[in-house]
Amino acid sequence: MSSGEYLRYVALGDSQTEGLGDGDETTGWRGWADRLAEQLAVVNPGLQYANLAVRGHGVERIRTEQLGPAVALRPDVATVVAGVNDLLRPRFDAAATAAHLEEMFAALTTAGARVATATFPDVGRIAPLARPLRSRVIDLNARIRGAAARHGVAVADCAPHDVSTDPRLWSADRLHASPLGHARIAAAVAHALRLPDSDDTWTLPLPPLPAPARRQVAAAELRWAVAFLGPWVGRRVRGRSSGDGRTAKRPQLLPVQIWPGAAVDDMSAARDGVPSRSRGRRALG
């Protein structure tokens, strides 16, 4: 199937696919999947898009709760990006996590969808306190690549590129991409899918930043731990998730409609080396 025949796009995943870090609870979350839908809609003005992602969900819950509805929507193209919530937990089983992802790859490709996924950056370079998790990320990424290869799934291989850990691509919590980060992820997935006018400019580094003093780094780590790491650990200890009580933001296929603010936002992203072919549409509804 050529990219010109993508008429139904369904996104599965967690908070990153939901769009956290790119918008807010009042205006809504845009996110990389919405941005990818916008680019798909440039090629196919009649594109319909559903986003089943729910923040805080691990891959087993995503497979259990999102895969069936996704297949029922008969997507032409689907994205499955998940696993970070699993590798952050004290008990992480890379083989089991990858197996759930592979089951989703298999089911969606068997149903006729063109499927794309992504690898994850070194979280220890984004949040130094998370350095012990580096081996988990490497292991999971290798398994994602292997599972994707077995099922013909396109991979946006973000992990090898230094820009993926640039702090400007991440929001203050260091778990969710910033608007610029979401733009880069969308560009990476578009490139993996070989969409018209997509290219590898998403891999380009941003202009260098001055190196912060050690005191500044230490202070920033302390603020992050208090504001974000502590509450996250607290939820896990209590057996709670940020997704408790939440449902998918876009459970049904809906048209991708024009959103005036997208042009300004995308122009800003383009100045930082993100492909600028997708303009003026947003997945509203």
Image (cartoon, helix red, strand yellow):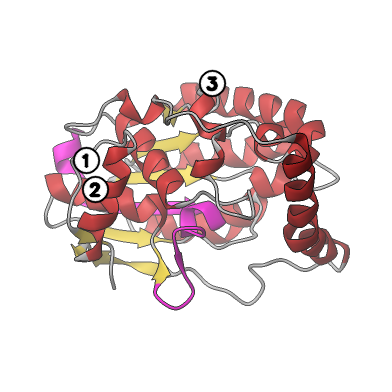
Count every numbered label the image shows and give the total.
3
Residue type at mark 1 is Ser
Between 183 and 154, which is closer to the camera in this rendering? 183
Residue type at mark 3 is Pro
Q: Are marks 3 and 1 in contact (CB under 8 Å)?
A: no
Q: Which residue is mark 2?
A: 267
Residue type at mark 2 is Met
Q: Secondary structure at mark 2?
A: helix
Question: Along the horizontal axis of the image, is 87 left or right of 165?
Answer: right
Q: Are marks 2 and 1 in contact (CB under 8 Å)?
A: yes
Q: CA distance from mark 3 to mark 1?
A: 23 Å
For the point 44% across and 58% down, the residue is 22
Which mark lies nearer to you, 3 or 1?
1
**Vertical comparison of 221 with 166: above or below:** below
Residue 219 in the image: x percent, y percent?
77, 49
Q: Which residue is mark 3?
A: 160
**Vertical comparison of 247 with 80: above or below:** below
Residue 171 in the image: x percent, y percent?
55, 52
For the point 44% across and 29% down, the residue is 155
Which numbered dot is residue 276? 1
For the point 41% across and 46% down, the residue is 180
Residue 265 in the image: x percent, y percent?
29, 55
The quarter of the rendered structure image containing the N terminus is top left
Question: Along the horizontal axis of the image, is 141 left or right of 181?
Answer: right
| Label 2, residues with CA under 10 Å away: few <14, some 14-19, many ≥20 | some
Q: Which of pointers 2 and 1 lies earlier in the amino acid sequence?
A: 2
- Find out whether residue 138 is within the magenta segment: no
- In this rendering, does residue 93 appear at all? no
Question: Along the horizontal axis of the image, is 240 left or right of 256?
Answer: right
* Highlighted range, magenta: 1-27
Q: Which of pointers 3 and 2 lies earlier in the amino acid sequence?
A: 3
